[in-house]
Amino acid sequence: MSQTPRIRQKKRAFPRILGRERAFLADTLRAETTGGLLLLGAAVIALVWANSPWQDAYHQLLEFDLGPLTVEAWASDGALTLFFYLAGVELKREFVVGTLSRVSEAVVPVAAALAGMVLPAIIYLAINLTAEDGRPHGWAVPTATDIAFALAVLAIVGSSLPSALRAFLLTLAVVDDFGAILVIAVFFSHGFHLLSLLASAALIAVWYVLQRRRVRTPFLYVPIAVGAWWFMHESGIHATIAGVALGLVTRVVPDPGEEHAPAERIEHRLRPWSAGVAVPVFALFAAGVTLSGNAVRELLTDPVAIGVVAGLLFGKMIGVFGGSWMTARFTRAELNSDLSWRDVGAVSVLAGIGFTVALLIAGLAFGDDIAQVERAKAAVLVASVLSALIAAGLLFRRNRAYAD
């Protein structure tokens, strides 16, 4: 008896996003886009202020003690914790019910993100290990992508682009954020204190238990979050890791009869604060680089600056595109029929926008060497602007092709 041949369905590298996940993606993109524009505005204000006659007031404000921390520390260790909490929630959601929960669909963006982190680090190290005055320990600076900034550029010039491409960028950024979190936790922890870490871990465990018991009152969660953040800071591990950990133990799947999971409710309330306040405040106090004639000349000769610019501008683009293409080429995954590799190439250039987390890592990598921190931050700004401009041009052409 003859049998009907089975038709093997090919896995899609960039699957279509449907239903509730599509609506969630749209909401996220809107909030992040607004945050990206505010982030850009805050960075411009910081640069103008730091290069104005009132630049001394800017630096004095950074060093002003506000309670137990300086204003600069509150911005990097405090404000960004909210950003990383939402990154933790997004990461868990993607792994539990999102794109990353389906292995066949997660392979390509995960491979692209990993290649997009490894290649910039290799380029940076190649430049700084061979230079006489190189600083290899800054290798992590060009490994991070700023999703808010990238999505803002995509929204401005790519309104007609397929949603699958936007979904790819968002998934790529989630994995990239997770990589940056691991880098910060493993390589930039100082003066480790076990008791403080255990206290933070205990509070995070309490948060998890309350989530399991379906407790909803913020009067318990807010003090727990503050305590976990403070003890994490005192442990010597960067305080933002507490935000990630709390995000990862927040419940993302709704119970039967429950309209929204706690993660969705909390994210709905906190995302405007993150995108509209926390990240712009960090940019205001992190992007104020003084660009004197000497500083600009140093950017052309300093191996750290050259490594950062080359890593973000070329390493990210080649890594993300190459990782995507090789994974699709050597596995059974295929590109979504709505897209072309030109689209992926344009978005790969966007990955070179390494603003928020790259600025944070620059401060952590070079610590008290203020001059080197300034040069590294200036290089991040230069590379991010160049990546944004080049990507905007490429995306504009692709947008016109889809609009016709």
Image (tube, rainbow, N blue to C red):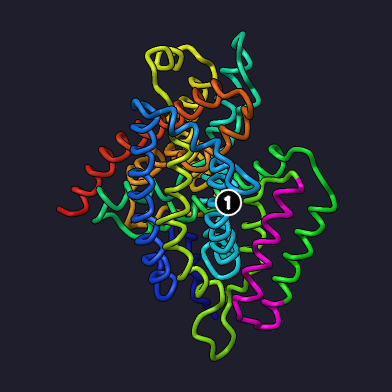
* Lateral position of residue 63 relative to residue 198, left or right: left
Residue stretch in magenta = 210-235
Q: Residues within 10 Å of mark 1 (few under 14, many from 20)?
A: many
Q: Residue at x 39, y 22 (%)?
A: 291
- Does residue 115 appear in this view? no
Q: Residue furthest left?
A: 404
The quarter of the picture where the N terminus appears is bottom right
Q: Which residue is mark 1?
A: 78
Does 119 appear above or below 25?
A: above
Give the image location of residue 400, x and y in percent: 18, 48
Q: Report x, y in % for residue 54.
A: 37, 29
**For the point 49% across and 75% down, which residue is it?**
4
Residue 92 location, quadrant: bottom right
| Residue 27, x across and y down, in percent | 38, 67
Q: Residue 229 magenta-drawn?
A: yes
Where residue 139 appears, as percent x and y from the top left, is 61, 29
